[in-house]
Amino acid sequence: MMSISEAITTIKKAENDADKMIEDAKQESSEMKENAREKANVLIQNARNEAHEQTGEILFNAEENAKKETNQISKHADETTKNTKNQATSKIPNAVEIIVKNIL
């Protein structure tokens, strides 16, 4: 049978062991939280970087499309202007003839 002194010592040791386990668990929990924060920050930064890259790509593509569309519009306007000029130029001899007939 265990003496009272031994029982008290065993209880005290168990209490100390329990306290140590609690402290270790708190420390481990704190480290886990810090690691989770660091991982979350890395994930957030990666997401921001990816979003920034995608935004750059979207802007680049939009600029390229806008340039292509501008060139198409410009070509169309040049063709329309050229056609209008040609039509007007082809009517000059008739206009001159009418003017000459009316004046003379």
Image (spheres, rainbow, N blue to C red):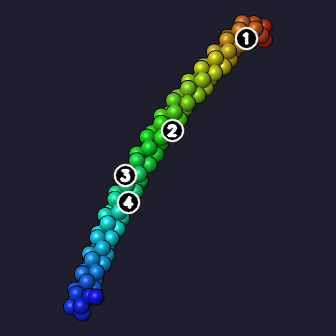
Residue 19 appearing in the image = no
Q: Are marks 2 and 3 in contact (CB under 8 Å)?
A: no
Front: mark 1 or 3 = 3
> Does residue 68 appear to the left or right of 91 in the view shown?
left
Q: Residue at x 53, y 35 (%)?
A: 62
**Front position among marks 2 and 3:** 3
The front one of 82 and 43 is 43
Q: Residue 57: horizontal and vertical position, in percent?
A: 47, 36
Q: Which amino acid type is marked by label 1?
A: Lys
Residue 42 bears which disc, if any? 3
**Callout 2 secondary element:** helix
Marks 2 and 3, how far apart in space? Answer: 24 Å
State which quadrant residue 37 falls in: bottom left
Mark sitting on residue 57? none
Determine contact: label 2, label 4, CB under 8 Å. no
Q: Amino acid at mark 4?
A: Ala
Q: Earlier in the sequence, mark 1 or mark 2?
A: 2
Query: In this picture, is 25 found above or below 59?
Result: below
To which residue does mark 4 refer? 36
Residue 31's image quarter?
bottom left
Q: Is residue 39 above or below residue 98?
A: below
Nearest to N terminus: mark 3 or mark 4: 4
Q: Secondary structure at mark 4?
A: helix
Residue at 35% x, 63% y: name it.
Answer: 32
Q: Tell which circle, 4 or 1, labels the residue nearer the N-terminal end.
A: 4
Residue on which the image places disc 1: 91
Answer with mark 2 or mark 3, whichever residue precedes in sequence. 3
User: Which residue in the protein does label 2 denote?
Assistant: 58
